[in-house]
DNA sequence: AATTCGGGGGC
DNA sequence: GCCCCAGAATT
């Protein structure tokens, strides 16, 4: 940390703040969550923006805040509808945690989002970044909000060579931004750092010639802006083979499955599927047996219709897709029988939307 | 400290 | 292909 203290002393923090904030106020993008100062909407935007690009978030934000305009509205909403509004955005625990958190705000704080770092920071899904972002933007509190942009920008400004993939490196940036943040305009300071990272100080080829804080930047001065930040690589994702069945009965109803309440894609809906293994039984046999043993469904499974590949951050699914007709189904099956129209109300992960598309295309 | 959580876009 | 994105929770 002594190292960081020296780096901080070397820059003129007041001038840095002024240059950054003036640039931000001049150049900031017009974004839906910047139209007012509603702490709830700012919170929603920050949760959506976790690991997600601005352009991706915009339509989801518009729809979500229209459907659930207040803490109260989201607290009272049906979880199926909340998940449907998040469908395709990914990291679905974000929205389950958000709804859980707004319920706590409604009950404990009368619907007013608390200003204290302890109270707001202890809400579900509110980590160090979201805490600083919401409290600084909504309430003008001088709390750092260190995300990927900020680590990249600050690593270049100060010349920090620690690996940003390591958990403890965050503390260095927390400390540095705590020292640098403007007490008068913490919202503009935090958003300015992020905006700079998004527009100017980009990962591969930063536009240093357009940078409002170029004069304060160690990396630019040394010509090593493309070397920073240092980030170690992650291991390759594992590959899994699955088989899935689009199941219908003779009346044209579909049979869909709700995923468990924890783990991957928790509480989302899907077509019946299992992870297959190489061995004596064919994929088709494994699927048929699984439907019988798992759901009490006797179905005629046709030939394989194709393979859907879906890539997660940590996992690859290769899903062999089959169409099946249900001949007999146990009354107490955990599958849900729905019409084509009803199925649209359920939130499906993109991987299973691909499967549905395969079926729809085939049917034409 | 490392892994698990989604999905899309840039190059 | 690989990398990254306004990260948090769990192990």
Image (cartoon, coloured by chain):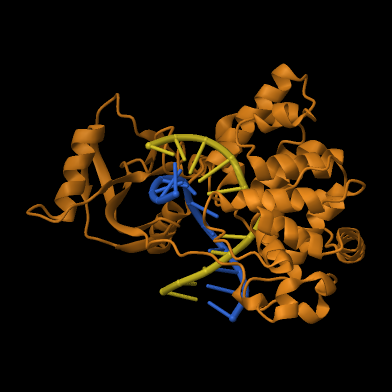
Chain colours: A orange, B blue, C yellow
- The residue drawn where x is 43% and y is 55% is A351
Percent across and percent down for residue A268 are: 46, 40
Which residue is most to the left?
A280
Q: Would residue A32 be visible to someone looking at this image?
A: no
Q: Quadrant of residue A333?
A: top left
Q: Quadrant of residue A135?
A: top right
Determine whether A2 is above or below A108 in the image: below
Q: Position of residue A225 (x, y in %)?
A: 67, 76
Residue at the spot x=69%, y=68% of the render? A156
Which quadrant is home to the C terminus of chain A?
bottom left
Residue A356 in the figure: left or right of residue A307: right
Can residue A196 be seen here? yes
Q: Is residue A150 left or right of residue A27?
A: left
Between A60 and A211, the one nearer to me in the picture: A211
Residue A77 lies, in percent from the top left, at: 64, 29
Front residue of A158/A44: it is A158
Q: Position of residue A209 (x, y in %)?
A: 80, 81
Q: Residue at x 68, y 71 (%)?
A: A202
User: Which residue is depicted at the point 53% across and 49% down?
Assistant: A167
User: Total number of numbered labels?
Assistant: 0
Which quarter of the picture shows residue A228? Answer: bottom right
A24 on left or right of A58: right
Relative height, residue A141 to residue A182 (above, below): above
């Amino acid at each position: 940390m002594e190292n960081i203290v020296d780096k901080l002393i070397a820059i003129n923090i007041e001038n840095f703040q002024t240059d950054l904030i003036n640039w931000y106020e001049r150049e900031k993008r017009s974004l839906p969550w910047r139209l007012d100062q509603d702490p709830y909407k700012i919170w929603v935007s920050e949760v959506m923006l976790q690991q997600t690009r601005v352009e991706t978030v915009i339509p989801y934000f518009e729809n979500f805040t229209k459907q659930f305009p207040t803490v109260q509205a989201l607290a009272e909403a049906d979880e199926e509808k909340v998940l449907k509004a998040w469908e395709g955005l990914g990291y679905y625990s974000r929205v389950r945690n958000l709804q859980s958190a707004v319920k706590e705000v409604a009950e404990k704080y009368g619907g007013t989002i608390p200003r204290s770092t302890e109270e707001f920071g202890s809400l579900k899904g509110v980590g160090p970044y979201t805490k600083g972002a919401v409290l600084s933007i909504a309430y003008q509190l001088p709390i750092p909000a260190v995300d990927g942009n900020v680590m990249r920008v600050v690593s270049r400004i100060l010349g920090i060579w620690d690996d940003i993939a390591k958990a403890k490196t965050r503390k260095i940036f927390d400390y540095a931004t705590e020292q640098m943040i403007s007490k008068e305009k913490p919202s503009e300071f935090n958003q300015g750092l992020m905006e700079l990272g998004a527009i100017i100080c980009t990962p591969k080829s930063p536009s240093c010639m357009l940078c409002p804080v170029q004069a304060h930047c160690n990396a630019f001065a040394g010509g090593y802006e493309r070397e920073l930040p240092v980030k170690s690589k992650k291991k390759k994702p594992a590959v899994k083979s699955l088989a899935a069945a689009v199941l219908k009965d003779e009346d044209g109803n579909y049979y869909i499955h709700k995923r468990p309440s924890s783990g991957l894609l928790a509480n989302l809906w899907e077509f019946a599927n299992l992870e297959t293994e190489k061995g004596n039984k064919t994929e088709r046999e494994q699927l048929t047996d699984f439907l019988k043993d798992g759901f009490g469904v006797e179905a005629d499974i046709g030939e394989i219709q194709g393979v859907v590949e879906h890539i997660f951050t940590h996992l690859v699914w290769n899903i062999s897709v089959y169409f099946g007709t249900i001949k007999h189904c146990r009354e107490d099956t955990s599958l849900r029988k729905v019409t084509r129209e009803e199925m649209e109300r359920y939130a499906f992960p993109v991987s299973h939307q691909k499967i549905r598309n395969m079926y729809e295309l085939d049917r034409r």
